[in-house]
Image: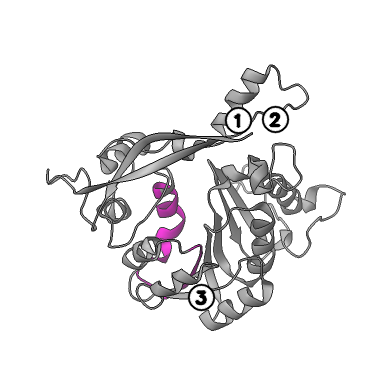
Amino acid sequence: MATKKKAAPVKAAKGGKPMGSGSGIAAEVVEVPVVAEVEPPVAEAGSGAPAEAAGRAAKLRPYAAYAFRGTDIRGDIREKYGFDGDLLELYASGTERVINKWHHYLPLYDRYFARWRNRPFRFLEIGVSKGGSLDLWRRYFGPEAVIFGIDIDPKCAAFDGISGQVRIGSQDDPAFLARVVEEMGGVDVVLDDGSHLMPHVHKTFEVLFPKLSYGGTYMIEDLHTAYLRRYGGGFRSGENFFNFARRMVDDMHRWYHTHGERRPDLGPDCSGIHIHDSVAVFDKDRPFAPTHSRVAARGRA
């Protein structure tokens, strides 16, 4: 039977004031209770003793276990990831609405999204939650970006028109997704921070990746859920999104094997796959058969 235990409260910024800022001004904080959910260990072939299985299971429920307990968000990210810059300052300063991000996502966002800053492009975020993320993207990308967010929670409609447009619907509804992309005039970047349920992640990718512009970027975050049964995943599960990504790798290399394409509707237009902790990024570009040349200076063999 599942049990719950209360963890120490996490301190978060309130009212958009910075936490641990370089100015030395102490931020106002609010107590955010964190609840850790512990499920019974699942015995798998070769999994070892139940205690070992329980330890591994605990590692796969990291939300409470890895909550930041300090006050210097900037310092934590700078020290661990060597990352600094506008996005860090925008995140750590906060907004009137709550933003919740894993710290190692910040440098990844900047790596894959920086080229879109201060230019007209179309950005779709799946999962609006408390609205703070849309505020972050508006400040980061600038006024020329077309920013849309979708969420199944009708309460998120309250954030429509503030930092972007918000539409209410399910991320596994192809007709709804198609209407949103049409309203946007197309889509260049997708960030899936939605339900994290494997069937939803798969369906959304299958619908939106073909609609992504060439040269576009599709990022899925919080993919540690791919290993959790309650999200429809599991280490050996065929629904684990990383297992799907492996099949996409095979399709990317279709030129070099004779096993055909498993997803001819997706694989041929995928020009790159990048895997990070809990994050998968897919590049879309026009496919060309590989070509190589042999070049030497004149007079040399």
**Over which residues does the magenta segment extend?**
106-127
Labels 2 and 1: the sequence-earlier one: 2
Q: Can you say whether 278 is above or below 139 in the image?
A: above
Under mark 2, the amino acid is Val
Label 2: which residue? 42
The label number, if any, that marks residue 57 in the structure image: 1
Q: How far across and down, in percent of the image, does residue 8 sit?
A: 36, 34
Q: How far across and down, in percent of the image, does residue 124 sit?
A: 50, 68
Q: How far across and down, in percent of the image, does residue 224 sit?
A: 57, 42
Which residue is located at x 76 percent, y 53 percent? 251
Q: State the CA–CA distance, disc 2 to disc 1.
A: 8 Å
Q: Quadrant of residue 287 in the image?
A: bottom right
Q: State the CA–CA distance, disc 2 to disc 3.
A: 39 Å
Which residue is located at x 58 percent, y 72 percent? 169
Dot 2: few (<14), some (14–19), or many (≥20) neighbours within 10 Å? few
State the quadrant of the N terminus: top right
Give the total number of marks visible in the rendering.
3
Label 3: which residue? 167
State the quadrant of the C terminus: top right
Q: Is residue 268 left or right of residue 11?
A: right
Under mark 1, the amino acid is Ala
**Residue 21 versus residue 248: which sits nearer the camera?**
21
State the SS at label 1: helix
Q: Can you say whether 249 is above or below 127 in the image?
A: above
Labels 1 and 3: the sequence-earlier one: 1
Q: How far across and down, in percent of the image, does residue 277 sit?
A: 53, 40
**Residue 43 versus residue 25: which sits nearer the camera?**
43
Under mark 3, the amino acid is Arg
Do tag 2 and tag 1 residues touch (Cβ < 8 Å)?
yes
Q: State the CA–CA distance, disc 1 to disc 3.
A: 36 Å
Q: Is residue 170 left or right of residue 25?
A: right
